[in-house]
Amino acid sequence: MASKGVRGLNEAMRSLSLSSQTCREAASHRIPSSTFTRSMATEAPLPTIETTADTTPAAGSLWRPATTVPLTIFNFPSFEPQRLESWSSKHLNLPLRRDILHHAVVYEGDNTRQGTASSKTRYEVAGSHRKMAPQKGTGRARVGDRQSPIRRGGGKTFGPKPRDFGTKITRKMYDLAWRTALSYRYRRGELVVCQDGMELPLPDAFEAMVARGDLPQDELRRSFKAKWLTQVLETNQWGRANGRSTFITGDRRQNLFEALDLVPKQGRALGLGMVDVKDLLETGRIIIERSALKEMLKQHQSDLVSSVFVTNAALPRRPQSGQILVE
Protein backbone atom coordinates (compact mmCIF):
# COMPACT_ATOMS: atom_id res chain seq x y z
CA MET A 1 0.00 0.00 0.00
CA ALA A 2 2.93 2.30 0.77
CA SER A 3 4.56 1.66 -2.64
CA LYS A 4 1.31 2.61 -4.41
CA GLY A 5 1.13 5.85 -2.48
CA VAL A 6 4.72 6.83 -3.37
CA ARG A 7 4.13 5.94 -7.04
CA GLY A 8 0.98 8.13 -7.19
CA LEU A 9 2.84 11.05 -5.60
CA ASN A 10 5.70 10.77 -8.13
CA GLU A 11 3.24 10.80 -11.04
CA ALA A 12 1.49 13.90 -9.65
CA MET A 13 4.77 15.78 -9.26
CA ARG A 14 5.83 14.79 -12.81
CA SER A 15 2.57 16.10 -14.32
CA LEU A 16 2.89 19.34 -12.34
CA SER A 17 6.41 19.94 -13.72
CA LEU A 18 5.20 19.31 -17.29
CA SER A 19 2.35 21.82 -16.96
CA SER A 20 4.67 24.50 -15.58
CA GLN A 21 7.13 23.94 -18.46
CA THR A 22 4.28 24.34 -20.98
CA CYS A 23 3.24 27.67 -19.41
CA ARG A 24 6.82 28.97 -19.61
CA GLU A 25 7.10 28.06 -23.28
CA ALA A 26 3.78 29.77 -24.03
CA ALA A 27 4.92 32.91 -22.27
CA SER A 28 8.14 33.03 -24.35
CA HIS A 29 6.11 33.08 -27.63
CA ARG A 30 3.86 36.16 -26.97
CA ILE A 31 1.99 37.75 -29.84
CA PRO A 32 3.13 41.33 -30.38
CA SER A 33 0.55 43.97 -29.56
CA SER A 34 1.03 45.65 -32.93
CA THR A 35 -0.95 42.92 -34.61
CA PHE A 36 -4.18 44.21 -32.98
CA THR A 37 -5.54 47.31 -34.69
CA ARG A 38 -8.56 49.36 -33.75
CA SER A 39 -10.96 50.10 -36.54
CA MET A 40 -12.44 53.54 -37.11
CA ALA A 41 -15.90 52.19 -36.43
CA THR A 42 -15.05 51.41 -32.81
CA GLU A 43 -13.11 54.59 -32.12
CA ALA A 44 -15.00 57.27 -30.23
CA PRO A 45 -13.61 60.36 -28.60
CA LEU A 46 -13.94 60.77 -24.84
CA PRO A 47 -16.74 63.06 -23.82
CA THR A 48 -15.66 66.54 -22.83
CA ILE A 49 -17.48 68.18 -19.94
CA GLU A 50 -17.43 71.93 -19.98
CA THR A 51 -18.74 74.01 -17.11
CA THR A 52 -19.89 77.53 -17.77
CA ALA A 53 -21.43 80.25 -15.66
CA ASP A 54 -24.86 79.51 -17.14
CA THR A 55 -24.96 75.86 -16.04
CA THR A 56 -23.89 76.45 -12.43
CA PRO A 57 -26.78 77.47 -10.10
CA ALA A 58 -26.61 81.04 -9.03
CA ALA A 59 -26.28 81.85 -5.37
CA GLY A 60 -29.54 83.76 -5.32
CA SER A 61 -31.53 80.95 -6.97
CA LEU A 62 -31.09 78.55 -4.05
CA TRP A 63 -34.20 77.96 -1.96
CA ARG A 64 -34.25 79.72 1.35
CA PRO A 65 -37.13 79.62 3.82
CA ALA A 66 -38.99 82.86 4.39
CA THR A 67 -37.83 84.74 7.45
CA THR A 68 -40.94 86.91 7.73
CA VAL A 69 -44.67 86.50 7.28
CA PRO A 70 -47.31 89.16 6.50
CA LEU A 71 -49.80 90.14 9.20
CA THR A 72 -52.83 92.37 8.68
CA ILE A 73 -53.85 94.79 11.42
CA PHE A 74 -57.63 95.30 11.59
CA ASN A 75 -59.89 97.89 13.12
CA PHE A 76 -62.34 96.88 15.84
CA PRO A 77 -65.26 96.33 15.63
CA SER A 78 -65.66 97.19 11.93
CA PHE A 79 -63.09 94.48 10.96
CA GLU A 80 -61.61 96.84 8.38
CA PRO A 81 -57.94 96.28 7.46
CA GLN A 82 -55.72 99.18 8.45
CA ARG A 83 -52.19 98.19 7.45
CA LEU A 84 -49.95 95.28 6.54
CA GLU A 85 -46.90 94.42 8.65
CA SER A 86 -44.10 91.87 8.50
CA TRP A 87 -43.52 89.62 11.50
CA SER A 88 -40.76 87.12 12.12
CA SER A 89 -41.34 83.50 11.13
CA LYS A 90 -39.94 82.43 14.50
CA HIS A 91 -42.85 84.22 16.13
CA LEU A 92 -45.84 83.32 13.96
CA ASN A 93 -44.77 80.56 11.56
CA LEU A 94 -43.39 77.72 13.65
CA PRO A 95 -44.24 74.09 12.75
CA LEU A 96 -46.93 72.36 14.74
CA ARG A 97 -45.56 70.39 17.71
CA ARG A 98 -48.37 68.55 19.44
CA ASP A 99 -46.02 67.04 22.01
CA ILE A 100 -44.80 70.44 23.19
CA LEU A 101 -48.34 71.81 23.35
CA HIS A 102 -49.42 68.78 25.37
CA HIS A 103 -46.57 69.25 27.86
CA ALA A 104 -47.48 72.92 28.29
CA VAL A 105 -51.20 72.29 28.81
CA VAL A 106 -50.53 69.51 31.35
CA TYR A 107 -48.02 71.74 33.15
CA GLU A 108 -50.58 74.54 33.45
CA GLY A 109 -53.32 72.18 34.62
CA ASP A 110 -51.14 70.55 37.26
CA ASN A 111 -50.04 73.88 38.70
CA THR A 112 -53.63 75.11 38.80
CA ARG A 113 -54.78 72.33 41.15
CA GLN A 114 -55.19 73.48 44.74
CA GLY A 115 -54.35 70.18 46.39
CA THR A 116 -56.21 71.08 49.61
CA ALA A 117 -58.28 67.86 49.95
CA SER A 118 -57.75 66.35 53.38
CA SER A 119 -59.31 63.46 55.32
CA LYS A 120 -58.80 62.25 58.88
CA THR A 121 -57.08 59.02 59.75
CA ARG A 122 -58.16 56.81 62.66
CA TYR A 123 -55.76 58.66 64.91
CA GLU A 124 -57.22 62.08 64.02
CA VAL A 125 -60.92 61.25 64.51
CA ALA A 126 -62.34 62.69 67.75
CA GLY A 127 -63.39 60.32 70.52
CA SER A 128 -62.01 57.75 72.91
CA HIS A 129 -59.58 55.21 71.58
CA ARG A 130 -60.67 52.58 74.12
CA LYS A 131 -61.35 49.07 72.87
CA MET A 132 -65.12 48.67 72.47
CA ALA A 133 -65.41 45.02 73.65
CA PRO A 134 -63.15 42.41 75.20
CA GLN A 135 -61.03 40.37 72.88
CA LYS A 136 -62.62 37.07 73.97
CA GLY A 137 -65.66 35.77 75.76
CA THR A 138 -68.43 37.65 73.95
CA GLY A 139 -69.02 35.11 71.17
CA ARG A 140 -68.74 37.81 68.56
CA ALA A 141 -65.96 38.98 66.32
CA ARG A 142 -63.17 40.94 67.88
CA VAL A 143 -63.48 44.70 67.54
CA GLY A 144 -61.19 47.62 68.08
CA ASP A 145 -61.98 51.26 68.86
CA ARG A 146 -64.66 53.45 67.31
CA GLN A 147 -62.11 55.12 65.01
CA SER A 148 -61.51 51.91 63.04
CA PRO A 149 -61.77 52.43 59.23
CA ILE A 150 -64.25 49.55 58.92
CA ARG A 151 -66.80 51.31 61.18
CA ARG A 152 -69.08 54.16 60.24
CA GLY A 153 -67.68 57.46 61.42
CA GLY A 154 -64.18 56.05 61.63
CA GLY A 155 -61.00 57.21 59.99
CA LYS A 156 -60.13 57.06 56.32
CA THR A 157 -57.56 54.57 55.08
CA PHE A 158 -55.12 56.06 52.56
CA GLY A 159 -57.27 59.17 52.24
CA PRO A 160 -56.21 62.39 50.49
CA LYS A 161 -53.89 64.79 52.23
CA PRO A 162 -52.78 68.28 51.23
CA ARG A 163 -50.13 67.98 48.54
CA ASP A 164 -48.58 69.83 45.65
CA PHE A 165 -49.65 68.51 42.24
CA GLY A 166 -47.40 70.91 40.37
CA THR A 167 -45.02 69.63 37.70
CA LYS A 168 -42.02 71.25 36.05
CA ILE A 169 -41.16 72.20 32.51
CA THR A 170 -38.19 74.06 31.10
CA ARG A 171 -38.72 77.71 30.35
CA LYS A 172 -37.52 77.37 26.75
CA MET A 173 -40.01 74.59 26.04
CA TYR A 174 -42.82 76.58 27.63
CA ASP A 175 -41.99 79.69 25.59
CA LEU A 176 -41.81 77.57 22.44
CA ALA A 177 -45.28 76.21 23.21
CA TRP A 178 -46.66 79.78 23.36
CA ARG A 179 -45.31 80.71 19.95
CA THR A 180 -46.32 77.33 18.52
CA ALA A 181 -49.91 77.93 19.56
CA LEU A 182 -49.88 81.42 18.03
CA SER A 183 -48.34 80.04 14.83
CA TYR A 184 -51.02 77.36 14.63
CA ARG A 185 -53.71 80.01 14.89
CA TYR A 186 -51.99 82.24 12.34
CA ARG A 187 -51.68 79.54 9.65
CA ARG A 188 -55.35 78.59 10.05
CA GLY A 189 -56.42 82.24 9.72
CA GLU A 190 -57.80 82.28 13.27
CA LEU A 191 -55.48 84.96 14.68
CA VAL A 192 -57.09 88.40 14.31
CA VAL A 193 -54.82 91.26 15.37
CA CYS A 194 -56.56 94.57 16.00
CA GLN A 195 -55.32 98.04 16.78
CA ASP A 196 -54.56 99.10 20.32
CA GLY A 197 -57.39 100.32 22.52
CA MET A 198 -59.84 97.63 21.42
CA GLU A 199 -63.15 98.65 22.98
CA LEU A 200 -66.81 98.04 22.17
CA PRO A 201 -68.27 101.39 21.01
CA LEU A 202 -71.90 101.91 21.89
CA PRO A 203 -74.33 103.66 19.50
CA ASP A 204 -74.85 107.37 19.90
CA ALA A 205 -78.56 106.83 20.40
CA PHE A 206 -77.88 104.63 23.40
CA GLU A 207 -75.52 107.19 24.91
CA ALA A 208 -78.10 109.91 24.39
CA MET A 209 -80.79 107.83 26.09
CA VAL A 210 -78.54 107.20 29.06
CA ALA A 211 -77.69 110.90 29.29
CA ARG A 212 -81.38 111.89 29.26
CA GLY A 213 -82.22 109.28 31.88
CA ASP A 214 -84.47 107.21 29.66
CA LEU A 215 -82.74 104.02 30.84
CA PRO A 216 -82.69 104.31 34.60
CA GLN A 217 -82.51 100.59 35.22
CA ASP A 218 -79.23 98.74 34.98
CA GLU A 219 -80.96 95.66 33.60
CA LEU A 220 -82.04 97.53 30.47
CA ARG A 221 -78.50 98.81 29.93
CA ARG A 222 -76.99 95.37 30.32
CA SER A 223 -79.59 93.85 28.00
CA PHE A 224 -78.83 96.44 25.32
CA LYS A 225 -75.06 95.82 25.61
CA ALA A 226 -75.56 92.08 25.30
CA LYS A 227 -77.74 92.40 22.18
CA TRP A 228 -75.41 94.95 20.61
CA LEU A 229 -72.32 92.76 21.14
CA THR A 230 -74.15 89.70 19.80
CA GLN A 231 -75.04 91.63 16.65
CA VAL A 232 -71.42 92.77 16.19
CA LEU A 233 -70.05 89.24 16.61
CA GLU A 234 -72.57 87.71 14.25
CA THR A 235 -71.80 90.33 11.59
CA ASN A 236 -68.06 89.58 11.74
CA GLN A 237 -68.70 85.80 12.07
CA TRP A 238 -67.01 85.68 15.45
CA GLY A 239 -69.91 84.45 17.55
CA ARG A 240 -71.24 81.13 18.76
CA ALA A 241 -72.17 79.89 15.31
CA ASN A 242 -68.51 80.13 14.26
CA GLY A 243 -66.90 78.63 17.36
CA ARG A 244 -66.84 81.56 19.85
CA SER A 245 -63.92 83.97 20.22
CA THR A 246 -61.36 84.91 22.83
CA PHE A 247 -60.59 88.62 23.17
CA ILE A 248 -57.18 89.48 24.65
CA THR A 249 -56.39 93.05 25.65
CA GLY A 250 -53.58 94.74 27.50
CA ASP A 251 -55.93 96.38 30.02
CA ARG A 252 -59.52 95.87 31.04
CA ARG A 253 -62.01 97.40 28.61
CA GLN A 254 -65.18 98.21 30.52
CA ASN A 255 -67.85 97.84 27.84
CA LEU A 256 -66.22 94.86 26.11
CA PHE A 257 -65.62 92.86 29.27
CA GLU A 258 -69.08 93.57 30.71
CA ALA A 259 -70.84 92.66 27.47
CA LEU A 260 -68.91 89.38 27.09
CA ASP A 261 -69.70 88.47 30.70
CA LEU A 262 -73.38 88.81 29.83
CA VAL A 263 -73.14 86.53 26.76
CA PRO A 264 -70.53 83.89 27.64
CA LYS A 265 -71.79 81.60 24.86
CA GLN A 266 -70.58 84.10 22.27
CA GLY A 267 -67.03 84.51 23.59
CA ARG A 268 -64.90 85.64 26.49
CA ALA A 269 -62.44 88.43 27.31
CA LEU A 270 -59.12 87.99 29.07
CA GLY A 271 -56.40 90.32 30.20
CA LEU A 272 -52.85 89.71 29.10
CA GLY A 273 -51.87 88.43 32.55
CA MET A 274 -54.69 85.85 32.59
CA VAL A 275 -53.84 84.07 29.32
CA ASP A 276 -52.36 80.57 29.17
CA VAL A 277 -51.42 78.25 26.33
CA LYS A 278 -54.69 76.39 26.82
CA ASP A 279 -56.63 79.63 26.29
CA LEU A 280 -54.97 80.06 22.89
CA LEU A 281 -56.25 76.65 21.74
CA GLU A 282 -59.77 76.40 23.13
CA THR A 283 -62.08 78.74 21.22
CA GLY A 284 -62.61 79.20 17.50
CA ARG A 285 -60.33 82.24 17.09
CA ILE A 286 -58.12 84.67 18.97
CA ILE A 287 -58.79 88.42 18.70
CA ILE A 288 -55.88 90.25 20.27
CA GLU A 289 -54.51 93.76 20.41
CA ARG A 290 -51.27 94.46 18.59
CA SER A 291 -49.52 95.71 21.74
CA ALA A 292 -50.71 92.67 23.69
CA LEU A 293 -49.32 90.35 21.01
CA LYS A 294 -45.99 92.19 21.03
CA GLU A 295 -45.75 91.91 24.81
CA MET A 296 -46.72 88.24 24.71
CA LEU A 297 -43.95 87.44 22.23
CA LYS A 298 -41.47 89.54 24.18
CA GLN A 299 -42.13 87.53 27.34
CA HIS A 300 -41.91 84.13 25.59
CA GLN A 301 -38.81 84.11 23.39
CA SER A 302 -36.12 82.89 25.78
CA ASP A 303 -35.24 80.01 23.43
CA LEU A 304 -34.35 82.31 20.53
CA VAL A 305 -31.27 84.06 21.98
CA SER A 306 -28.84 82.65 24.51
CA SER A 307 -28.69 84.38 27.87
CA VAL A 308 -24.96 83.67 28.23
CA PHE A 309 -22.84 86.81 27.78
CA VAL A 310 -19.57 86.37 25.90
CA THR A 311 -17.07 89.22 25.75
CA ASN A 312 -16.22 90.51 22.27
CA ALA A 313 -18.59 88.07 20.58
CA ALA A 314 -21.31 88.77 18.05
CA LEU A 315 -24.45 87.31 19.59
CA PRO A 316 -27.45 86.61 17.34
CA ARG A 317 -30.05 89.34 17.33
CA ARG A 318 -33.58 88.76 18.47
CA PRO A 319 -36.10 88.41 15.64
CA GLN A 320 -37.83 91.66 14.82
CA SER A 321 -41.57 91.89 14.20
CA GLY A 322 -43.98 94.71 13.46
CA GLN A 323 -42.36 96.45 10.50
CA ILE A 324 -45.00 98.29 8.46
CA LEU A 325 -45.19 97.24 4.80
CA VAL A 326 -48.40 98.87 3.57
CA GLU A 327 -50.49 101.46 5.38
Image (cartoon, rainbow, N blue to C red):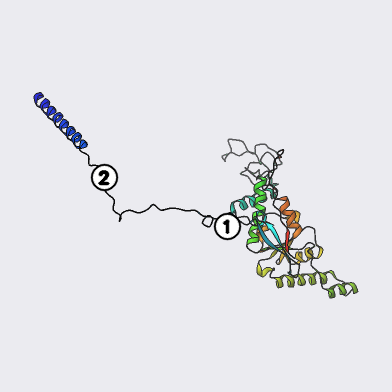
Q: CA distance from mark 1 to mark 2?
A: 55 Å
- Residue closer to the observer: 167 or 129: 167
Residue at the disc numbered 2: 34
Q: Give the residue drawn at x 73%, y 54%.
A: 296
Q: Is residue 282 left or right of residue 226?
A: left
Percent of width and height locating residue 50: 47, 53
- Residue closer to the observer: 185 or 99: 185
Picture quadrant where residue 144 is located: top right
- Residue closer to the observer: 135 or 17: 17
Identify the amino acid type marked 1.
Ser
Q: Give the residue drawn at x 66%, y 68%.
A: 242
Residue 72 seen by the camera: yes
Percent of width and height locating residue 57: 54, 55
- Residue closer to the observer: 14 or 173: 14
Please, what secondary structure does the residue beneath circle 2 have?
helix
Percent of width and height locating residue 110: 66, 49
Percent of width and height locating residue 107: 65, 49
Q: Earlier in the sequence, mark 1 or mark 2?
A: 2
For the N terminus, which image quadrant? top left
Q: Give the residue drawn at x 74%, y 71%.
A: 232
Query: Cβ–Cβ below 8 Å for labels 1 and 2?
Result: no
Residue at the disc numbered 1: 61
Asked if residue 195 is positioned above or below residue 130 in the image, the reply reads below
